[in-house]
Amino acid sequence: MDCCNKKILRSDEDKKLLIHRMNRIIGQLNGIKNMIENDEYCVDILTQLAASKAGIRSLANLIIDKHMHSCVVKDIKEGKEDTIDEVLTILRRFQ
């Protein structure tokens, strides 16, 4: 299954939410970069890294939720059961 040629139209509201989350994560990562450049304490950097990881996980969960309720449901209704393997493969990457 070639995921690179697939696209999904997202509502403006969904895009706004996802981009807002991405911008927060980017801000966190830039803050961590600054902490490293300023020789901040290791534990403080690790704390911020953990927060960034949680932010990424939260963003991924939002996208997975939308994917399951839209693309996966549509594909299964159309008999495209290989979508289940695609979902399982991507979920394993987050373990």
Image: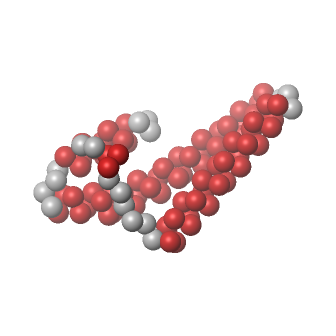
Q: How is the image coloured?
A: secondary structure
Q: In this view, does 74 lie above or below 37?
A: below
Residue at 73% x, 43% y is 30
Q: Is residue 45 above or below residue 55?
A: above
Q: From this viewpoint, which residue is outermost toward the front?
A: 5
Q: From this viewpoint, which residue is outermost toward the left?
A: 79
Q: Where is residue 16 in the image (x, y as percent from the top left)?
A: 56, 66
Q: Where is residue 26 in the image (x, y as percent from the top left)?
A: 66, 48
Specify the quadrant that holds the N terminus.
top left
* Residue 13 appears left or right of 77: right
Residue at 82% x, 31% y is 37
Rendered image quadrant of residue 19: bottom right
Q: Where is residue 32 in the image (x, y as percent from the top left)?
A: 74, 38
- Res. 44 in view: no
* Residue 45 appears left or right of 18: right
Specify the quadrant that holds the C terminus.
top left
Count the labels in the image: 0
* Residue 49 appears left or right of 74: right
Residue at 56% x, 64% y is 17
Q: In this view, does 45 lie above or below 27?
A: above
Q: Where is residue 12 in the image (x, y as percent from the top left)?
A: 50, 71
- Res. 19 in view: yes
Residue at 36% x, 41% y is 90
